[in-house]
Image: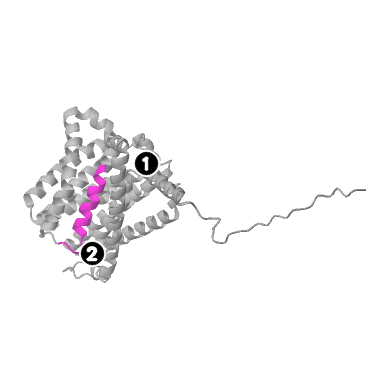
Amino acid sequence: MTDNKQPQTSIELVIDSSINANQTPPQLTINNQKQCLLSILTRLHAGYFRISFALCSQALLWKSLGEPSDNPHAMRRLLQTVPSTAFVLVWSLALMAQVLLSLLYTLRCLLYFRNVQAEFLHHVGVNYLFAPWISWLLLLQSAPFLTPKSNYYLFLWWVFVLPVVALDVKIYGQWFTKGKRLLFSVANPTSQLSVIGNLLAARAAADMGWKESAIYFFSLGMAHYLVLFVTLYQRFSGSDKLPAMLRPVFFLFFAAPSMASLTWNSISGTCDTPSKLLFFLSLFIFASLISRPCLFKKSMKKFNVAWWAYSFPLTVLALASAEYAQEVRSSIANGLMLLLSALSVLVLLGLLLFTALNTNILLSKDDPFLSVNDI
């Protein structure tokens, strides 16, 4: 018999240890990063500036409460014990958030101009175009290293106010020329952002000593606030104009009179009767809203960036209560100031925590703002 066995050959595998099996080719990494950035830009919208102007208003609150005061009440002195480094940290965080959002939105304007144009043409989206300039004005007024008398303050004021004026011409001019039918069809709680933008411009002008300019912006904001207040009050029950997830913007109802109270205080130099009237109005609307928790029930089921709409109005109300307590100096007024300030800080901390825990859905495709703008 012949042996039919074939000779066996052995194959030796040599693994080069210098090659990492998990290493990603550089070109693939760059493409992934580019796709990730483009995905962020398509989903980012002006509504995300809620985050920055919540932080910026908080910085203004901490600055206001930390300033020297002749109010001898113990509650006021307690708030002044907060170290100044805490205010600087809050202001720096607000600045970083605002710069980051501004850079991303600028890229969106350059790469996805049609999406930005869709926001500009929509009755909800156009109002949030005031948000970046509101944030910058808040940062300017709370800046720890700029005084209202400096030339840099004046220059930055012009830079931030001119876009507000341009948007005013577009929105208010449209209301004036097309009549109440257009106003009834487009008016919604976010329309009050235009009013807040004008009032902030007026407050900054008053701080610089430009009283005539301050009165101009104040009259422009308050005239349109009265029109909006009557229009929105008549259709308050028609909250179905906005998706349920966007109902936190109803807090803007008391943000506008609170800001008006602060602005008139800066113009007149004291918390006089008009300033108190506006503060009391904001308190009444705040009480009316928090007594109707069912209005916000659906919006609280799942985290959304719209939750940040709670922070700014509460902070402005706390600022107005601080000015009121400074004038009245009663235990009730100071207790109200302490309560609202603590509530504002707690809400902001809660929002920061929820945002950190839900970063994976922060730029969700299911964002109701995107469906509102049809983009």
Residue 285 x, y percent position in the rendering: 28, 47
**Of all residues shown, which one is farthest toward the left?**
212
Q: Secondary structure at mark 2?
A: helix
Question: 331 above or below 108?
Answer: below
Q: Residues within 10 Å of mark 1 (few under 14, many from 20)?
A: some
Residue 196 x, y percent position in the rendering: 21, 47
**Of all residues shown, which one is farthest toward the right?**
1
Question: Quick check: is 132 in the magenta stretch?
Answer: yes
Residue under the point 17% across and 40% down? 166
**Of all residues shown, which one is farthest toward the front?**
2
Labelled disc at residue 42? 1
Q: Earlier in the sequence, mark 1 or mark 2?
A: 1
Question: 75 above or below 43?
Answer: below
Residue under the point 16% across and 31% down? 176
Instruction: Name the main secondary structure of what is drawn in magenta.
Output: helix
* Spatial separation of the CA atoms under disc 1 and disc 2: 39 Å
| In this rendering, the label closer to the viewer, 1 or 2 | 1
The C terminus appears in which quarter of the rendering?
Answer: top left
Residue 363 x, y percent position in the rendering: 40, 46
- Camera sees residue 128: yes
Residue type beneath disc 1: Thr
Left or right: where does residue 56 sit relative to residue 2? left
Residue under the point 16% across and 61% down? 146
Q: Residues within 10 Å of mark 2 (few under 14, many from 20)?
A: many
Residue type beneath disc 2: Leu
The residue to which callout 2 is attached is 65
Left or right: where does residue 163 sit relative to residue 208? right
Instruction: Give the magenta part as a residue range.
Output: 129-146
- Camera sees residue 295: no
Tell me, what colour scheme is on the image?
Answer: one colour
Relative depth, front residue between 85 and 306? 85
Q: Secondary structure at mark 1?
A: helix
